[in-house]
Image: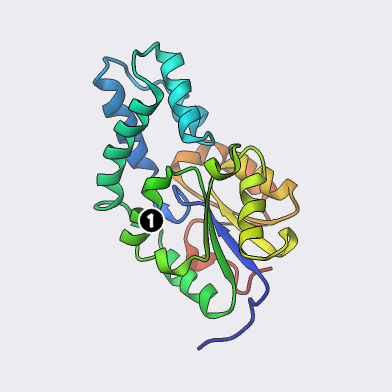
Amino acid sequence: MTTDENLGKAAIFDLDGTLLDSMGVWDQIDAAFLAKRGITVPDDYMETVTAMQFREIARYTIDRFDLDDTEDGLMAEWDRMAHDAYTSIVQPKAHALDYLRYLKDTGARLAVATTMPAGLRAPALGHAGMLDLFDAIVGVDDVGRGKEHPDIYLEAAARVGVPAHAATVFEDLLAGVQSAAGAGMHVWGVYDESSAQSWPAIQSIAQGVLDDFAQAPRPLA
């Protein structure tokens, strides 16, 4: 049944680890990529790069491991590896698709705010059956700064014509939870194993938390 209980509101979603059960894919990509170069993935690598822009990750990786690769070469290699995974094995988080459909049916505007490379976003969302549900897709490359700054969330809200105070952000990354909350947005933390270490901090900041979208707010704040 269609209602208007979320009219004038927006929901902004991260992709990796929030809507998509995909963070393990990047662990596998990093391990395979570095193994080809005789390097074991350091314990702090994923946590360090997870909020960065894609080119920033490439630059950091080259500098940290003293690689001979170029930034463009690294990004192209990662993109090829990730495209195969996102269009074959990556699945939505539990009840995520049902929740998106509920929001759409009740008048909410939907946006993506992601660090995922531009070439992967549509294929990943298409494979998950979500692409046609979104009104805007924004990446950190569109705003020039990572998720430790609120720019990406504010841009997503602006693109769907909703003020920050009427937007709810769903995010598994502590840096994103902090910046979105600091910008005056409603924030829900989404549990993912990749951010388990940050979960207590996320719980202390977010207005609500979930590990299954059956627990997501109806209606939005």
Q: Is residue 157 above or below residue 109?
A: above
Task: Describe residue 203's horizontal placement relative to residue 26 as left or right.
Answer: right
Give the image location of residue 15, x and y in percent.
46, 51
What colouring style does the render use?
rainbow
The residue that appears at 74% across and 46% down in the rendered structure is 182
Q: Residues within 10 Å of mark 1 (few under 14, many from 20)?
A: some
Front-lying residue, 142 or 127 = 142
219 over 215 or under it: above or below: below
Please tell me in which quadrant of the rendered image residue 62 appears.
top left
Q: Residue furthest top?
A: 66
- For disc 1, the marked residue is 122
Instruction: Please state the horizontal and vertical placement of residue 82, each as a whole percent of the image.
Output: 31, 41
Q: Amino acid at mark 1?
A: Ala
Residue 156: tell me if it is visible: yes
Query: For numbered disc 1, what is the local secondary structure?
Result: helix
- Closer to the camera in the image, 139 or 12: 139
The part of the image, by quadrant, that contains residue 46 is top left
Percent position of residue 192, x then y: 46, 47
User: Quick one: quadrant of the C terminus?
Assistant: bottom right
| Image position of 19 (left or right of 168) | left
Q: Residue at x 42, y 68 (%)?
A: 132
Q: Residue at x 47, y 24 (%)?
A: 44
Please state which of residues 102 and 205 is positioned toward the viewer in this rendering. 102
Q: Indicate the quadrant where residue 65 lies.
A: top left
Please determine whether, in this image, residue 116 is positioned above or below residue 78: below
- Residue 200 visible in rendering: no
Is 207 drawn above or below residue 201 in the view shown? below
Residue positioned 58% across, 69% down in the render: 109
